[in-house]
Image (tube, rainbow, N blue to C red):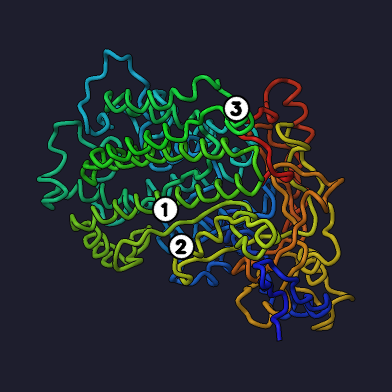
């Protein structure tokens, strides 16, 4: 007998129709039977560091469901503008960092924009300004200029260090800015900086070794360590700095759109430390000059008018960067800024190569560019993972890991230096849309068009026990989204989910009453968690059923065509959080609204910012409609 929802290939290799899903009443009864309600956390819990109390409570429930073996945890979202999704993702990530030793947050964002945030949360200096050609004095393979010359705090290239998360998020200037320039992300960035500088830095280190990481790095030629990383002769203070850097958590982007910004970042770095390499790479990148600043014009010229492409040029540029970057990584582990700068260099060169392929194919079938983009996500994830593992191995070779573990054990643990694993195995959290993280093999895009996504690729690349995928859903509420690509963000009402869709099953289970049976019709409440590994629940929820995805564009008038697709939920994700009624995320670029009561679990309240936003735009104080010149709209919902 065919498993419900299972799809099979016929003799010609085509997907056959799935067995029909179980009836809605049975599915709703299974949801009610297996749902884990999220309690309303007491105010004291939030005051003790839990942030938004309901989201903190959800995170505590979820943490118990994340197996200890998981080291790639993918946290989705059903929209790009829902406050509860951002808050719960943020709170769970904090717990994974503080209690499970995760050391990277990799997000659906351009690398250069996120790199500024990474420098801020790590307390590192901004990158150098591009010097004039005659000022190039560094030799080949030289490490970056001494970090001691600049105060810690991130900041734009050659500028002052950032003083706040708002400033650190300042490179998010183009559509859709609210995705990352919002109050919830800013709060998380401030928490991460505080965790890295105060909690991680205090673990296993004496008081005299504390202080800004940037100011403890020695100038070039100074005796920053005794011996070298291979000799194991670093002094105690250098050991402490290296260990704390390895235990800190970074913030990285993995998207592919920043062709020109990434190319400029590569050249800026190379001009400062390796002028000869800069000249070689710049000659390769000049291939793009005849197409101007609009990356889409490059795609039009190469795919429609069949002009010669820059594929070979960027491939050679990436190879040149990778050939040289090994020398830049020769810095000792107590020079964390040097290692992060080397990662930035290679990652930006990888973006240029990925973006070239993306735009060269942008006028072909949609799934081609989608697949290129998500493969780039994986390549970036693995680059960050390799970087973190390399740094951990350097520190372990110098004896810092063992010393930190012993010190933490003697002090009772805490602060992020606990012995989370016996050997360096980086742990990473991924933030992206459900459509990128829910296994595409179990969606109609995968069945019918051969579309893949990051969730599928991660499951294929890593042992199953090391991977966990969490999805979100909602029935109704509000969302921050634009009416069309490049238009201003608005707080929009989300239509109630369609009958028969997964979201409507969750709604029926949540509200109780008739229609669905089971347990006398009593629901689990307005926020609950489902463990999709439970066999009875997985069987009852087997697809195909409709599922909703709202990106940066919301088109309620054509919602069925624009935002729904078929999926098999229990095979897409491991866990699901349902929030019955949700609120819109609040962008940083509009004034905060007057304080009002805030509904628990979502909807209305203090994030009703649309009036303030309209006034700010009219005064020229907010430019929420600024477009992203490198980012085309190829997907109706903008995911």
Q: Percent from the top left, x then y, of residue 8?
A: 67, 73
Q: Is residue 346 above or below residue 424?
A: above
Query: Badge 1 is on which residue?
Result: 382
Q: Count neighbours of disc 1 (C-alpha within 10 A) and say few if under 14, some if 14 to 19, many if 20 or more.
A: some
Query: Badge 2 is on which residue?
Result: 461
* Labels 1 and 2: the sequence-earlier one: 1
Q: Secondary structure at mark 3?
A: helix
Q: Percent from the top left, x then y, of residue 262?
A: 46, 32
Task: Identify the residue at image location x=26%, y=19%.
Answer: 136
Q: Secondary structure at mark 1?
A: helix
Discs 1, 2 touching: Cβ within 8 Å: yes
Q: Secondary structure at mark 2?
A: helix
- Real-space Cα distance between discs 1 and 2? 10 Å
Image quarter of residue 293: top right
Query: Badge 3 is on which residue?
Result: 301
User: Quick check: 173 left or right of 546?
Assistant: left
Image quarter of residue 124: top left
Q: 268 and 102: which one is in front?
A: 268
Task: Identify the residue at image location x=46%, y=45%.
Answer: 252
Q: 291 and 93: which one is in front?
A: 291
User: Quick check: 15 left or right of 495?
Assistant: left
* Labels 1 and 3: the sequence-earlier one: 3
């Amino acid at each position: 007998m065919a498993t419900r929802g299972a799809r099979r290939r016929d003799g010609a290799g085509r997907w056959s129709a799935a067995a029909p899903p179980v009836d809605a009443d049975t599915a709703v009864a299974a949801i009610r039977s297996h749902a884990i309600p999220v309690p309303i956390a007491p105010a004291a819990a939030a005051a003790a560091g839990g942030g938004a109390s309901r989201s903190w409570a959800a995170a505590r429930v979820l943490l118990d469901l994340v197996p200890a073996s998981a080291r790639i945890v993918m946290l989705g979202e059903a929209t790009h503008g829902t406050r509860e999704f951002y808050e719960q993702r943020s709170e769970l990530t904090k717990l994974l960092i503080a209690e499970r030793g995760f050391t990277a947050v990799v997000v659906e964002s351009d690398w250069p924009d996120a790199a500024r945030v990474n420098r801020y949360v790590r307390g590192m200096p901004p990158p150098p300004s591009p010097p004039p050609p005659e000022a190039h004095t560094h030799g080949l393979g030289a490490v970056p200029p001494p970090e001691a010359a600049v105060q810690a705090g991130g900041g734009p290239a050659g500028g002052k260090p950032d003083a706040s998360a708002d400033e650190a998020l300042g490179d998010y200037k183009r559509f859709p800015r609210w995705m990352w320039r919002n109050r919830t992300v800013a709060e998380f960035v401030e928490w991460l900086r505080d965790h890295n500088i105060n909690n991680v830095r205090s673990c296993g280190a004496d008081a005299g070794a504390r202080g800004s990481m940037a100011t403890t790095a020695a100038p070039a030629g100074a005796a920053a360590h005794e011996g070298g990383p291979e000799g194991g002769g670093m002094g105690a203070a250098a050991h402490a700095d290296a260990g704390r850097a390895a235990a800190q958590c970074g913030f990285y982007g993995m998207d592919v759109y920043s062709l020109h910004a990434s190319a400029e970042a590569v050249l800026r770095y190379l001009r400062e430390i390796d002028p000869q390499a800069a000249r070689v790479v710049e000659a390769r990148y000049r291939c793009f000059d005849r197409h101007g600043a609009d990356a889409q014009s490059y795609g039009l010229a190469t795919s429609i008018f069949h002009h010669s492409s820059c594929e070979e040029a960027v491939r050679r540029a990436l190879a040149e960067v990778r050939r040289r970057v090994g020398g830049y990584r020769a810095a000792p582990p107590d020079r964390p800024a040097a290692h992060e700068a080397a990662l930035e260099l290679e990652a930006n060169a990888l973006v240029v190569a990925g973006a070239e392929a993306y735009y060269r194919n942008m006028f072909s079938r949609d799934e081609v560019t989608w697949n290129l983009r998500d493969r780039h996500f994986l390549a970036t994830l693995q680059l960050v993972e390799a970087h973190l593992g390399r740094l951990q191995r350097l520190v372990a070779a110098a004896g810092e890991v063992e010393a930190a573990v012993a010190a933490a054990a003697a002090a009772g643990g805490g602060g992020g230096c606990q012995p989370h694993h016996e050997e360096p195995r980086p742990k990473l959290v991924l933030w992206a849309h459900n459509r990128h993280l829910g296994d595409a093999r179990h969606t109609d895009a995968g069945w019918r068009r051969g579309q893949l996504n990051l969730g599928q690729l991660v499951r294929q690349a890593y042992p199953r026990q090391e991977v966990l995928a969490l999805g979100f859903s909602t029935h109704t509420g509000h969302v921050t989204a634009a009416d069309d690509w490049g238009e201003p963000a608005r707080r929009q009402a989300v239509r109630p989910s369609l009958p028969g869709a997964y979201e409507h099953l969750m709604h029926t289970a949540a509200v109780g009453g008739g229609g669905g049976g089971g347990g006398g019709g009593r629901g689990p409440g307005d926020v609950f968690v489902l463990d999709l590994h439970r066999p009875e629940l997985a069987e009852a929820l087997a697809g195909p059923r409709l599922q909703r995805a709202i990106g940066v564009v919301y088109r309620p008038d054509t919602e069925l065509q624009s935002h729904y697709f078929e999926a098999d939920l229990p095979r897409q994700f491991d866990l699901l959080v349902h929030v019955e009624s949700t609120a819109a995320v609040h962008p940083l670029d509009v004034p905060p609204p007057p304080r009002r009561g805030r509904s628990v679990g979502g909807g209305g309240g203090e994030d009703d910012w649309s009036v303030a936003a309209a006034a700010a735009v009219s005064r020229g104080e907010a430019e929420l409609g600024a477009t992203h010149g490198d980012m085309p709209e190829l997907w109706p919902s903008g995911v």
